[in-house]
Image (tube, helix red, strand yellow):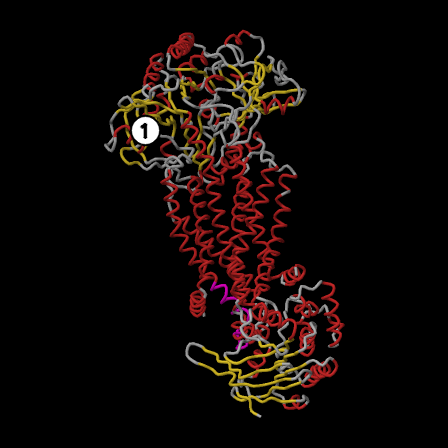
């Protein structure tokens, strides 16, 4: 029976080729959407490596400090002193559990990279290159090995670097990274790994884990290679702190220097904005894909319906030689399944190239296979659903009438 | 003849309502998506205020520095670089130097107001045609003298003054007091070149250090006599820069750059080698990518439509047979069928054109993109109509060709194609 | 073999009621070759369809092999058609998308028979009608007479005891018609197949043992 179906499909290949192409493209559309969705969904449940509970981000605009430093004018000493006073002012506030300066913050869309090199291979790795000793406590980073930055690191003749577990695996494999120098080749100072943290996915829940490194900065940022004051202050307030504290905090820091300006954003707000930004394309893509599939489904019903009317005589003949209604039902659906299988086979053959040739590496082969398998299943369901009505119509054909159909 | 075609077309469409419905569904859905994309594209690239002279505008956004001839970094030019080397280029009618928008803080009743501030110099207000809601731009004279005057956008006026007029009133931005001389319509954030909330003369900066900066936060905009002069200008700017040493960085550091169109700027996001793209933005590739995406998207709807059309013809095999038997040529039949299909797609196009503004309205209302205001205009309308037309011809021709090959006797016998 | 008792068939459309068969009593013995004659629209084809269980009479009973066929399920009717009856049509009704041999195999397909066995029987049937050399052609590549021979092969491939032929030569010229007729007569003679043939052609009807005449749905003798 299957052979017979294959034969029917093959001999009608000219009529079927378009349906096959249609199924092929529908599969690709569905697989793309499913794979992306599953990829996002899976990432969403991976550990982030940090917690933003009660963390505020204060963006600083220290124009007068920067210009005075650049110009090397006499103001610079005074301005630097004010930066130190800002630190002291924050320290005095008991509502603050921890605070730190940083060049970047979680959920910022920006990408900062820095150059490293290990055993002759050049590395370009995402880096937070100006965080102070308090950074780990503000975000609750989990140390796996070694230590975090300490205030007296400023005295070292080399620059300490903390890396995440992913970077450890990628760069060092099974070696112990602690104490290893990963400075780029012509660098004047060494960069030594002093600690490993479990995870840090700066770009939030939807991205796959990636290698990440941290370099330290002093508060006023004048010492060593890492020049410039922090871009952000990250503040973690104690649980139960009233909302009115925000105003108090802002007046306290504004009092230090009137020329500087500060903008406060809770990280939960950055998170919301960034996740929305990430979700919009996939939601839009999903809606478009859904409409495409509805369109294809309706088209399929139309084409099959037409096929059935076209083949009324054939169906009548089959009935007259002893085909039951069930036989006709199975015939129509069976042919459809065969056609769909051909389209799907082509689609799967193309789709598996992506993980096999490592074209898109950040999506795992498991997510790919899941996406491909479930797309195949869904396309079968869709085609069979589309075939139900036409095949029912076909089974209802009265042989005596069909054979007089001229 | 055409009238006859149209009459038949409508009759056929009404006779098979289900087929007509699925065809219309596919066509109008496809067009809605394409028109929304066209509207987004229009929003970024089409000339509308304040960028009305896009076709002859060039911008300098980047400065690529090299150390001992090796690419070092892609940064932003400073005032000095643009003032010395981009000013007075040949064939240039107007020239402006303006900063990238930086965030600036103000207070109103104790609440913080954060705005984007752009400082301008040169012919900024002549190159860009802002829509002024009240007042007007500040003059070149204001810039030379360093007068504390500002143009603000509608959103900023609302934040500071509610619905009242802002003319002549003062705003304090980053502890500096400016007098408002003009209010303009909001500029969408995708309009990267003129975008800001507040525009002030560059001479109001707190220090005049910017005058010495080779690298900094400025961009240059050139209004050129005609498009044909673009290559000459790019070449001249490049050759002027080839003699420049970045003294602040040391003897071995050189800088290069290229005036470019808005489209070329966006094409840079496609990636590729940074240093190459500075001199030669991959704008051809951006076109290619956009076309490919559009074609990929249209494959499914087209196949779907062709499929449905073929089915419709099959059903009418006997009709075709009768027509042929009574003397219709293949050509008239092709004409009839293509007309039928074009009518159908244009109907779908009509539905799409009615639905697209609704989708755009939703997008605007969602506030995803700052100050974005998506709307239909004649450009998008005609793009949509054009796409619908081609869609109709394209998806109708193959089935019609198949049909025309049908032998009348076979057709009369009701044989399958 | 076939017995019709008081068979009546009424076609009802919204406005008109047509009496296609009116009180038909007919008995056909095993091994008989019967022609049914009559003018167009007299109910010949309907009679054939009722005999072949393609159509259910409005009244009366149909017996095949002595067992009455009344109100059987679709599935059971299909099985009887498949096992006991073979059909031949004026317009052949070959499936244009299948080759000759595949067309012939169709009845066996519904017997859940193994592929090789099907092929073997189909080839044998084609050999019987003299088309062994054309098995892989498509119907459109054959002449009308050849197509009708394929249709006969399809009708006999399942070795039914009854053949029902509806103007089998109606679309053929006289030479091809004679060829087809010869095959049918041979089947009747050699295999003792019962054949009921509807025809317009008195010459062909004369070649059969018995003629049943119909007029306006009535049997006239």
Residue B140 vertical placement versus A247 (above, below): below
Foreground: A209 or B92?
A: A209
Foreground: B152 or B58?
A: B152
Residue B82 vertical placement versus C174 (above, below): above
Q: Is residue A68 left or right of residue B304?
A: left
Residue B134 shows in the view:
yes
Q: Position of residue A117 (x, y in %)?
A: 63, 20
Q: Position of residue A177 (x, y in %)?
A: 63, 17
Foreground: B379 or A209?
A: A209
Specify the farthest residue to the left: B164
Specify the farthest residue to the front: C67
Q: Which residues are magenta?
A: B323-340
Q: Residues within 10 Å of mark 1 (few under 14, many from 20)?
A: some
**Quarter placement of the C terminus of chain C:** bottom right
Residue C119 vertical placement versus A354 (above, below): below
Specify the farthest residue to the bottom: C221
How would you classify the magenta stretch by its main secondary structure? Answer: helix
Q: Is residue C146 magenta?
A: no
Q: Is residue C135 left or right of residue A149?
A: right
Q: Which residue is found at the position 47% from the left and 30% from the top?
A: B60
- Figure quadrant of residue C202: bottom right
Q: Position of residue B357 (x, y in %)?
A: 38, 48
Q: Position of residue A105 (x, y in %)?
A: 46, 23
Which element type, helix, strand or loop, lies under badge 1? loop
Badge count: 1
Task: Tell me the subunit letter for badge 1.
Answer: B
Would you name the residue on which mark 1 appears? B139
Q: Is residue B325 magenta?
A: yes
**Quarter placement of the N terminus of chain C:** bottom right
Residue B394 shows in the view:
no
């Amino acid at each position: 029976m299957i052979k017979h179906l294959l034969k029917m499909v093959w001999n009608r290949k000219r009529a079927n080729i378009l349906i096959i192409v249609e199924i092929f493209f529908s599969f690709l559309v569905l697989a793309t959407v499913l794979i992306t969705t599953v990829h996002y969904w899976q990432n969403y449940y991976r550990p982030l490596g940090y917690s933003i509970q009660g963390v505020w981000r204060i963006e600083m605009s220290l124009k007068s400090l920067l210009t005075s430093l650049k110009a090397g004018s006499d103001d610079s000493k005074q301005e630097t002193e004010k930066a130190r006073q800002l630190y002291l002012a924050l320290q005095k506030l008991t509502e603050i559990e921890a605070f730190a300066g940083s060049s970047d913050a979680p959920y910022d869309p920006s990408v900062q990279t820095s150059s490293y090199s290990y055993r002759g291979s050049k590395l370009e790795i995402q880096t937070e290159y100006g965080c102070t000793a308090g950074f780990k406590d503000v975000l609750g980073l989990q140390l796996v090995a070694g230590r975090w930055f300490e205030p007296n690191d400023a005295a070292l003749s080399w620059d300490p670097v903390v890396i995440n577990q992913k970077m450890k695996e990628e760069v060092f494999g099974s070696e112990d990274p602690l104490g290893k120098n990963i400075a780029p080749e012509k660098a004047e100072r060494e960069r030594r790994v002093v600690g490993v943290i479990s995870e840090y996915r700066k770009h939030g829940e939807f991205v796959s884990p990636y290698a990440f490194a941290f370099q330290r900065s002093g508060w006023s940022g004048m010492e060593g290679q890492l020049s410039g004051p922090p871009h952000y202050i990250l503040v973690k307030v104690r649980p139960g702190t009233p909302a009115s504290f925000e105003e108090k905090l802002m007046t306290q820091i504004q009092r230090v220097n009137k020329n500087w300006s500060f903008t406060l954003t809770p990280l939960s707000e950055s998170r919301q904005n960034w996740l929305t930004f990430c979700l919009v394309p996939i939601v839009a893509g999903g809606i478009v894909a859904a409409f495409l599939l509805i369109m294809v489904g309706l088209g399929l019903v139309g084409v099959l319906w037409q096929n059935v009317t076209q083949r009324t005589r054939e169906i009548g003949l089959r009935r007259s030689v002893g085909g039951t209604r069930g036989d006709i039902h199975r015939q129509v659906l069976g042919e459809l399944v065969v056609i769909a299988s051909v389209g799907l086979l082509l689609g799967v053959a193309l789709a598996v190239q992506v993980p096999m040739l490592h074209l898109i590496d950040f999506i795992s082969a498991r997510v790919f296979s899941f996406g491909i398998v479930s797309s195949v299943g869904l396309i079968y369901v869709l085609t069979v659903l589309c075939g139900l009505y036409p095949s029912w119509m076909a089974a209802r054909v009265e042989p005596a009438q069909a054979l007089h159909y001229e | 003849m055409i009238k006859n075609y149209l009459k038949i077309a409508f009759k056929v469409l009404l006779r098979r309502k289900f087929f007509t419905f699925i065809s219309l569904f596919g066509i109008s859905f496809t067009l809605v998506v394409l028109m929304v994309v066209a509207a987004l594209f229009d929003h970024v690239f089409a000339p509308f205020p304040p960028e009305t002279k896009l076709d002859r505008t060039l911008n300098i956004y980047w400065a690529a520095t090299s150390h001992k001839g090796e690419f070092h970094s892609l940064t932003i030019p400073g005032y000095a670089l643009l003032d010395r080397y981009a000013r007075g280029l040949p064939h240039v009618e107007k020239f402006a130097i303006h900063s990238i928008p930086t965030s600036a803080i103000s207070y109103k009743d104790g609440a913080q107001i954060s705005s984007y501030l752009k400082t301008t110099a040169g012919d900024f207000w002549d190159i860009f045609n802002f829509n002024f809601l009240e007042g007007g731009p500040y003059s070149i004279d204001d810039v030379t003298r360093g007068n504390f005057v500002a143009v603000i956008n509608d959103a900023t006026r609302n934040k500071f003054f509610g619905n009242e007029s802002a003319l002549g009133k003062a705003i304090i931005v980053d502890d500096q007091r400016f007098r408002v001389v003009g209010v303009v319509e909001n500029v969408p954030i995708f309009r990267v070149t003129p975008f800001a909330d507040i525009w002030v003369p560059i001479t109001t900066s707190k220090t005049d250090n910017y005058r010495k900066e080779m690298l900094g936060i400025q961009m240059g905009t050139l209004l050129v006599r005609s498009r044909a002069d673009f290559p000459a200008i790019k070449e001249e700017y490049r050759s002027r820069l080839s003699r420049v040493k970045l003294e602040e960085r040391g003897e071995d550091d050189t800088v290069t750059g290229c005036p470019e169109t808005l489209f070329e700027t966006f094409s840079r996001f496609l990636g590729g080698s940074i240093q190459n793209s500075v001199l030669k933005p991959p704008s051809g590739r951006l076109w290619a990518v956009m076309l490919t995406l559009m074609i990929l998207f249209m494959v499914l709807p087209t196949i779907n439509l062709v499929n449905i059309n073929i089915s419709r013809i099959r059903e009418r095999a006997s009709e075709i047979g009768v027509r042929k038997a009574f003397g219709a040529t293949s050509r008239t039949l092709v004409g009839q069928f293509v007309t039928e299909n074009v009518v159908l797609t244009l109907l779908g196009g009509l539905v799409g054109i009615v639905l697209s503004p609704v989708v755009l309205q939703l997008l605007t209302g969602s506030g995803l993109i700052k100050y974005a205001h998506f709307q239909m205009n004649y450009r998008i309308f005609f793009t949509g109509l054009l796409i619908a037309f081609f869609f109709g011809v394209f998806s109708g021709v193959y089935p019609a060709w198949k049909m025309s090959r049908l032998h009348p006797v076979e057709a009369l016998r009701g044989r399958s194609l | 073999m076939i017995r019709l008792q008081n068979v009546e068939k009424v076609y009802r459309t919204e406005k008109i009621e047509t009496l296609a068969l009116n009180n038909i009593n007919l008995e056909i013995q095993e091994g008989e070759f019967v022609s049914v004659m009559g003018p167009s629209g007299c109910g010949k084809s309907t009679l054939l369809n009722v005999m072949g269980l393609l159509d259910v009479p409005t009244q009366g009973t149909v017996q095949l092999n002595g067992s009455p066929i009344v109100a059987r399920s679709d599935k059971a009717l299909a099985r009887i058609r498949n096992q006991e009856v073979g059909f031949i049509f004026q317009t052949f009704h070959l499936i244009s998308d299948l080759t000759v041999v595949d067309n012939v195999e169709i009845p066996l397909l519904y017997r859940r028979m193994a592929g090789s066995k099907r092929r073997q029987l189909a080839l044998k049937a084609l050999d019987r009608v003299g088309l062994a050399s054309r098995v892989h052609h498509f119907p459109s590549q054959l002449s009308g007479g050849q197509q009708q021979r394929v249709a006969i092969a399809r009708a006999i491939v399942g070795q039914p005891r009854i053949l029902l032929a509806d103007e089998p030569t109606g679309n053929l010229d006289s030479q091809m018609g004679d060829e087809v007729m010869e095959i049918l007569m041979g089947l009747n003679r050699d295999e003792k197949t019962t054949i009921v043939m509807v025809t317009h052609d008195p010459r062909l009807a004369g070649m059969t043992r018995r003629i049943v005449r119909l007029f306006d749905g009535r049997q006239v003798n």
